Image (cartoon, rainbow, N blue to C red):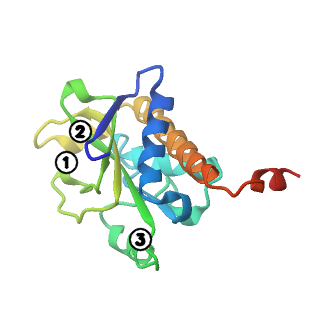
Amino acid sequence: MNTPTIISSTDPAALSRLSLVMEGALGSRGAADRAVVFACIGTDRSTGDALGPLVGQKLSRLGMEDRFIVGTLEDPLHALNIADRLGPVLAGDPPPLVVAVDAALGPLASVGSIAVRPGGLRPGQGVGKDLPVIGDLAVTATVNVAARGLDAQVLQSTRLFHVQQMADLIGVACWWALRTVRREVEPAGAREARAA
């Protein structure tokens, strides 16, 4: 996967399509036997920008260990703490595979779309922040229309219902894809032994 894959969150098959895309992306980056950390960027102080923390919250509720999630509603990952929170994670030996998740603004036709692309993302770019690129894989959801200079206000007035729907979709797809990638490389009989 060298080009972005874009999926409409309103597609009835969105969950299965996004899960398959994430499974391929994670699998090709060694997620089967490498630590995977989800950097869920955003803040709960803005409905549009709450997508990342909502994804982190969903992953936590699905049972993912907290050490593999940076950014939840309780403890958001945002511009003011990103270096302090991600620095120790990236210093791991070997470093983990980091999946960066963030909200985006774009043209009207893109609202409601979820993009998965190789490489990281530059958080805060849409609202004029200059932060370093984060992640080996990026997942973004276009939550509203870009409005040149008014993007912060647009994020504030974005409907939480739509953001929550996309966050749930992303969270379940990421969780399922990672489980599938790791289950496929289990030694023969491991599943049966665990079930016994």
CB atoms at circles 2 and 1 under 8 Å apart?
Answer: yes
Mark sitting earlier along the chain (2/1)? 2
Badge 1 is on which residue?
126
Mark sitting earlier along the chain (3/2)? 3
Alpha-carbon span between mark 3 and mark 2: 25 Å
Alpha-carbon span between mark 2 and mark 1: 7 Å
Residue farthest to the front, as pictured: 188
Instruction: Please count the marks in the image.
Output: 3
Q: Secondary structure at mark 2?
A: strand
Q: Secondary structure at mark 3?
A: helix
| Left or right placement of residue 157 versus residue 145 in this view | right
Q: Does 117 appear above or below 90?
A: above
Q: Amino acid at mark 1?
A: Gly
| Left or right placement of residue 43 versus residue 174 in this view | left
How crowded pointer 3 is (Cα within 10 Å; few <14, some 14-19, many 20+) is rated as some
Q: Position of residue 139 (x, y in %)?
A: 36, 46
CB atoms at circles 1 and 3 under 8 Å apart?
Answer: no
| Disc number placed over residue 85 in the picture, else none | 3
Alpha-carbon span between mark 1 and mark 3: 21 Å
Q: Position of residue 125 (x, y in %)?
A: 19, 53
CB atoms at circles 3 and 2 under 8 Å apart?
Answer: no
Q: Amino acid at mark 2?
A: Leu
- Residue under the point 43% across and 63% down: 97
Q: Position of residue 73 (x, y in %)?
A: 49, 52
Q: Amino acid at mark 3?
A: Arg
Mark sitting earlier along the chain (1/3)? 3
Looking at this view, is 42 or 26 the one in front?
26
Looking at this view, is 161 or 17 the one in front?
17
Which quadrant, please, contains the N terminus?
Answer: top left
Q: Position of residue 127 (x, y in %)?
A: 19, 50
Badge 2 is on which residue?
105
| Disc number placed over residue 29 in the picture, else none | none
